[in-house]
Amino acid sequence: MFHALRGALLVASMVAPHRIVSLLPSLTEDICALGLQARLVAVSAYSRDIPCAKGLPRVGDYQSVDNERIVALHADLVIGIPSQAQLVAPLRALGIHVVLLPDESYEDIYLDIARIGEVAGVAPRAARLTETLKAQVAALHARTRSFRTHPSVFVALSVEPIWTVGPQSYIARMIELAGGRLVVTKLAQPYAMYSPERLLALQPDAIVATRDSEIDTVLAKAPWRELRAVRLHRILIPPNDDMLVRPSPRFIEGLRWLIQRLQPIANRSAHSS
C-alpha cells in the first residue's frame, strides 16, 4: 500500500500540482496573488484573516503539521519554510512534493513568488506579478525624494519585555523604502530583546508599534514617557499588523501606510519638541 501510494505521488509530481497546501500565511498570500486559490486545499492555522483561505482546513503552524490530514486531502504540493523541514519529513518520505522557501527578507518576497510560480506551472504569471510589485514600490519610494529629513524609527514588537528589529530584518527594509531610517543599527539578529536604557539613549523621531505590542499600556512608564517620540505623539500603529510584518504581496499596503505617516514627520523639523 505504502509503495503504491508513493509511486502514484511520484508520477503526480511530474505535472503541475492541483492540490496545494500552504504552511505559512505569507506563502498563502503569494499563492492567492498568483491566482492559484482554486488549487488550495489547506492552509496554516494563522491564515484565518486571508479571504482566499476562508473555510479551508488548518493543518499546521510553526511547531506542528498534521501530515495525516495532508495525505488524506491528496495534496500534491506542500509549501512551507526551512524551519519546518523536520515536521514535513514524513510527507517527503511518501513522495509528496515539498518546497521550503525562505521568508525573512524583503528580497524573499520576489524569490518566493518566482519559485511558487515555477513549481505551480505559472512562471510567466509570477514574473508579471513581480514586475507589477516592483513598479509599485518604485512609484511609492519616489515620493520620499521630497522628504526634508529621514526620520529615525524604532520598531516595538512588544513592550514588556521590549522586542525590536535590527537592520537585517524585513521591516528595516520597509522603513528605508518609506523614507525613514531604522534607529537600531547594531543588532546581531533580525529580531531581539532591547534594553530600556538603550532605547532611551536612542531618542527616535518616531515609533512604529504593532497592535499586538500593546504599547498604549506603557506610555506613562519609563523609559517610554521620556522619549521625544512619545511626547510628540509620534506613535505609529498600523490598522493591521500583517500588512507591516508579513513579507507577502500585501506589503505594498504597509509601505503606503508607512510613507503617509512618516511624510509629515520628515517635512517638519525632525528634532522639534
Image: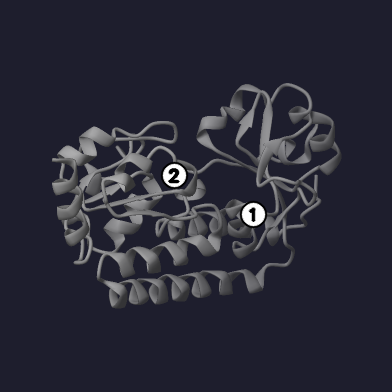
Count neighbours of disc 2 (C-alpha within 10 A) and say few if under 14, some if 14 to 19, many if 20 or more: some
Q: Which residue is mark 2?
A: 85
| Nearer to us in this view, 145 or 18 | 18
| Relative height, residue 137 to residue 95 (above, below) | below
Which labelled disc corresponds to residue 93? none
Q: Nearer the N terminus, badge 1 or badge 2?
A: 2
Question: Can residue 238 be seen?
Answer: yes
On the image, which quarter does residue 250 sit in?
Answer: bottom left
- Total label count? 2
Pick the front one: 103 or 8: 8
**Disc assigned to residue 172:** 1
Instruction: In the rendered view, tell whether residue 111 sits above or below residue 153.
Output: below
Q: Amino acid at mark 1?
A: Ala
In the depicted structure, whether residue 221 falls above or below residue 120: above
Quadrant into which the C terminus falls? top right
Image coords of residue 214 (percent x, y)? 56, 27
163 over 121 or under it: above or below = above
**Callout 2: SS:** loop
Q: Secondary structure at mark 1?
A: helix
Find the distance from the CA under tag 1 to the CA under tag 2.
27 Å
Quarter of the image with the N terminus is: top left
Q: In this view of the protein, can residue 19 be seen by the observer?
A: no
